[in-house]
Structures are given as C-alpha cells and as structure tokens.
Amino acid sequence: MKKKILLVGGGGREHALFKALKRSKNETEIWLYPGNIGMEKDGGKKIAEKINNWEELAEWALKNKIELTVVGPEIPLVEGIVDIFNEKKLVIFGPSKFAAQLEGSKKFSKELMKKYGIPTAKYECFSDKKSAQIYVERVGAPIVVKYSGLAAGKGVSVCETVGEAFKALGDIFDGNGFGDENCAVIEETMFGEESSVFVLTDGTNYKILPCAQDHKRIFDGDKGANTGGMGAYAPAPVADKKVIDEVEKTIIIPTLDAMKKEGGEYRGLLYVGIMVTENGVKVVEFNCRFGDPETQAVLPLVNCDWFDVFYAAAVGDVSKIEWEVSANFAAAVVLASKGYPKSSQKGIKILGLDEAQKIKNVDIYHAGTAIGENGEIVTDGGRVLSVTAWDETLKKAVERVYSAVDKISFDGMQYRKDIAKKGLLRLDGEA
Ligand code: AMP
Ligand code: GLY
C-alpha cells in the first residue's frame, strides 16, 4: 500500500523534503500544497481543490486518508496548523503553536533562554520607541535591533551606528511594513562564525543532522543585502565535535527540557542558529522548521527512511529509528533572478536543467519557477533554483556543484561563486 503524504510549502526546501521522502522504502503518494513545478515533474500531485485555511486543509487530509503531513515553512506552524491537525487525530510533523513561538516571537525565545540559562546575546525588550532609543543611546553601537515577530528574514538589523539603530527602531514602531507585534528586541552584537544546527526531535529524544553554514548576503565575500540564503554546505568544519557537544549540553537538552516545563513539548525540527564566539557557543536564533537552503545541502547526507523519521518525530520515539550519516560533504548554490532580493523577474526562459541533472551526485531543486507559454520552464520569483552536489571532500563537492551550475543559464541569473569558502579555508588551515 502506498503511503499517502501531504507536503505543505513550495520552495527549494520543500522540493528537497519531497525528494528525501521519495527515497522511502515504502512507495509514496505525495500531495502538494501548494508545491512547485519541480515537485510535480517528480511525481507530486497538486491539490486541485481551493483551500482557504488550515482547517480546510485538515478536512481535506482527513477525507483523503493522509497518513503523514510534513510542513516546510514557518507561517503555518506559527499559525497553529499542527494543533488543528492533531485535533482531528491526523499525524503531522512540526511543533505546536505554543512551541513554534520559539521562532514566532523573539521575545518568547529570548525570555526562555534567559530563564533557563541558555547562552545567547544579552538583550532587552521594548514596547515603545522612546525607551528603546534611550537604551540604544546609553549602550551605543554596534548593536542589534530585531523585530520580535515573523519578518521573513528582514526583521534583523546589525547596526554599526546609533543612527542605523534609530532607523531600525523607526521601521518597527512607525508601522513601516512589519506586523502588529510592536516590540523590539535589542541585543549586544556577537562576533564569530555561524552555523545552522538542525535537531530532529520527538520532544525528548533527538538526532542532530550534519551542521550547515548558510550564506545570507547576496554578493561574494558576505557583501550586499541580506537574502533568504544564497547557498549552504555541510558538514561545516566550524561546528566540530567539540562545538556540537557544547551545543547539546548547553542548548539542545536545556531547551527541550525548558519547553516541557513551560507546558509545550517541542516536536519537529528545531533549527538552532549558533555563533561560535571566543566565549563559547551562543544562540543567534531558533527557527521552528528546516532552513532554506541548508536543507538542500543536509538531507542528501543522511541515509534513513524520512517517512519513518518524520512519523516518529510526530508521534513516536526518534531514538528507535535507523539513521546513518554519510561521510560525504554537500554544497548547495542558489540561482536567483535579476534584482533579487529587492525584486525579481518572471517569465525568463531557463536553459540547461537536463544537462545539469545528468551530472552524477547532483540534485536540482525548484523554487521560483513556472511553465511558460510554450511549455518551457521559466523564472517566477527571486530564488529560482538551488543546485546541490555531494562528494567525498568539500572541495570536490564544491567543484561538482559549480560544474552543474555552469550548465544552467537564464537572463539576469545571479549566484554566489564563493559558497563554502570559509569551510575550505578552515580545512586548509588544518591540513
Ligand atoms: P536572526 O534572524 O535572528 O537569525 O538574525 C539574522 C542574522 O543577523 C544572523 O544570521 C546573524 O548573522 C545576524 N545577527 C543576529 N543577531 C545577532 C547578534 N546578536 N550579533 C551579531 N549578529 C547577529
Ligand atoms: N537559511 C535561513 C533560514 O532558513 O532561516
């Protein structure tokens, strides 16, 4: 019997989750809400009915005998999709609405970390602009200003001057585009190298995936505007065994315990964004879901049955699953359209996808793509595609991924040419 799965989301991360689920030993039938054309080409089925809210999606899942729902993006989780599905006794992978506050409210996550002694940047929360400004003037720059609620990666300003911090506070309190949680978190600036640690958990037991490193800026050398992420690689040498041991002891175990004590066990994927500083490892942020594009680099490195893994995290015990991490490295490069992250171009023909996919140990994931008037694949968003390759060394994985990227082209295509550079330098240094 085919396993019926519903996958929520439609970006490169979800395409990677889709391909991982397809590697299950069981035959699968994967339904997409909303999915993308890459997933459809790979056999996913787009839900035809119009769905207006998570209640209706849960009704649909019930009617269609879905055995497991996997949620990619944060918004459904923060809005409480898991609670809605659970009420109907549907199995769904992800944290509850309460637990998803770890990402949905920086105020919540910072207060939790303070209460339980989990290492993070010192901070203060403010609900009015005037007192926030007085605090910034007193502390001085550099200083970090964060909008407390969800802001699609745009709510954080690392400010070099007090003036910049005032501008960031204006964006939060003067209603220039953020939501209505009028609350700013102001933090000390941390210095060090970052890594994304993915923890798969049933609330008590957990598995740590190979740690990745994202590349948030649009241009090489970490220059230019912040983006959703322009590339990733794993395992990132900065997160060596010593660092991971410290993360387990000082962050993962205390956080899972704290969530239980606060009355909301955390099930699903806990994304711990860390900074490895001179004074130990500190939490930069928690997210309540897999990262994009880190997922595209991380999933090809784990040999397991992802259906079983997500199922166990949702309703079982992840310590009982079969789980093998390969000795390979993987690198993922995001291909973005002209103007990204400010704008994007739609309808531009993409060439070379089949050629690139022919290269061994390469996977291509769709995100902002569509079918054009003549049936060709065209651009349809900012982050258009991501390309992943894996190999036995990081250097080889990087060479392989760029050899695949070289086959793909579209007008205005932009991508970073230095993905994994920090990791390669670190490995060279050790050699
Ligand atoms: P966040 O959305 O909280 O992860 O922040 C986005 C990015 O801003 C992080 O990946 C860091 O590069 C940077 N950042 C956030 N908080 C701090 C901090 N306290 N010190 C230095 N950089 C930070
Ligand atoms: N790549 C960063 C994120 O997914 O939040």
Image (spheres, grey):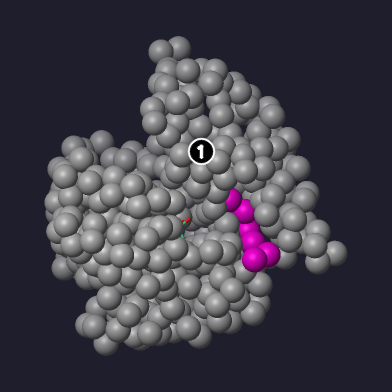
Q: Nearer the viewer, residue 165 or 86?
A: 165
Q: Nearer the viewer, residue 369 or 345?
A: 345
Q: Quadrant of the C terminus?
A: bottom right
The type of residue carrying mark 1 is Gly
Label 1 Cα neighbours within 10 Å, binned few <14 / some 14-19 / many ≥20 = few
Q: Looking at the picture, does residue 364 appear above or below residue 392?
A: above
Q: Is residue 147 left or right of residue 415?
A: left
Q: What residue does disc 1 label?
A: 224
In percent of the image, x 33 and y 47: which residue is there?
A: 163
In percent of the image, x 18 and y 55: which residue is there?
A: 129
| Residue 87 painted magenta | no
Magenta extent: 230-238
In this orientation, does residue 240 appear?
yes
Q: Secondary structure at mark 1?
A: strand
In this orientation, does residue 371 appear?
no
Residue 107 pos. (x, y %): 25, 67
Q: Is residue 320 left or right of residue 139?
A: right
In percent of the image, x 22 and y 41: which residue is there?
A: 177
Q: Quadrant of ligand 1?
A: bottom left
Q: Nearer the viewer, residue 42 or 423?
A: 423
Q: Quadrant of the N terminus?
A: bottom left
Q: Looking at the picture, does residue 35 appear above or below residue 373?
A: below
Residue 326 pos. (x, y %): 68, 65
In percent of the image, x 73 and y 49: which residue is there?
A: 397
